[in-house]
Image (spheres, rainbow, N blue to C red):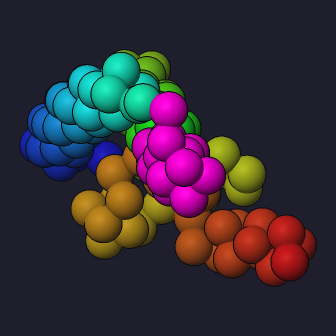
């Protein structure tokens, strides 16, 4: 894999990570405000607040997972393993990496993995 492409992917990964961290901080502040502003209310309002809280927590969990994937991709860039499928070791097409810079597997292995998960 050429150095120009690797540098482009590194910049893209770092930008994605920065955006996710900012989003988590923003959502965390929104979450804290939501909890802080809760008063004793009727059951419908309490249930709605609980749903809002659970939605924020689920979003945060997905964003944290994406940050871990980005960190893993950055680590693979450093050790020369970026762009290689974690399962079969073949090169991941550059088009896939441009679409999903933190991709762990080639399309064939990912498809196989998803079929097994069903």
The residue drawn where x is 73% and y is 51% is 87
* Residue 16 visible, this angle: yes
Number of numbered callouts drawn: 0
* Residue 91 visible, this angle: no
Using the image as rendered, state which of residue 10 and residue 48 is in the foreground: 48
The residue drawn where x is 57% and y is 73% is 107
Q: Is residue 45 left or right of residue 86?
A: left
Residue 49 place in picture, x, y as percent? 48, 46
The residue drawn where x is 36% and y is 21% is 36
Query: Does residue 53 belong to the magenta stretch?
Result: yes
The C terminus: image quadrant: bottom right
Query: Does residue 86 belong to the magenta stretch?
Result: no
Which of the 4 image quadrants contains residue 56?
A: top left
Q: Is residue 117 above or below residue 63?
A: below
Q: Is residue 69 left or right of residue 14?
A: right
Q: Is residue 24 left or right of residue 39?
A: left
Tell me which segment is drawn in magenta. Answer: 40-56
Which of the 4 image quadrants contains residue 78?
A: top left
Residue 65 place in picture, x, y as percent? 53, 37
Residue 17 place in picture, x, y as percent? 26, 33
The residue drawn where x is 42% and y is 30% is 39
């Amino acid at each position: 894999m050429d150095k120009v492409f690797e540098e482009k992917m590194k910049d893209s990964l770092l930008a994605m990570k920065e955006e996710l961290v900012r989003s988590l901080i923003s959502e965390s502040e929104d979450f804290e405000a939501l909890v802080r502003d809760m008063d004793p209310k009727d059951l419908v309002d309490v249930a709605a607040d609980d749903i809002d809280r659970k939605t924020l927590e689920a979003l945060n969990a997905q964003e944290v997972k994406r940050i871990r994937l980005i960190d893993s991709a950055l680590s693979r860039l450093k050790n020369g393993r970026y762009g290689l499928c974690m399962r079969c070791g073949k090169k991941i097409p550059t088009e896939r990496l441009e679409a999903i810079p933190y991709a762990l597997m080639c399309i064939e292995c990912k498809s196989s993995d998803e079929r097994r998960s069903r």
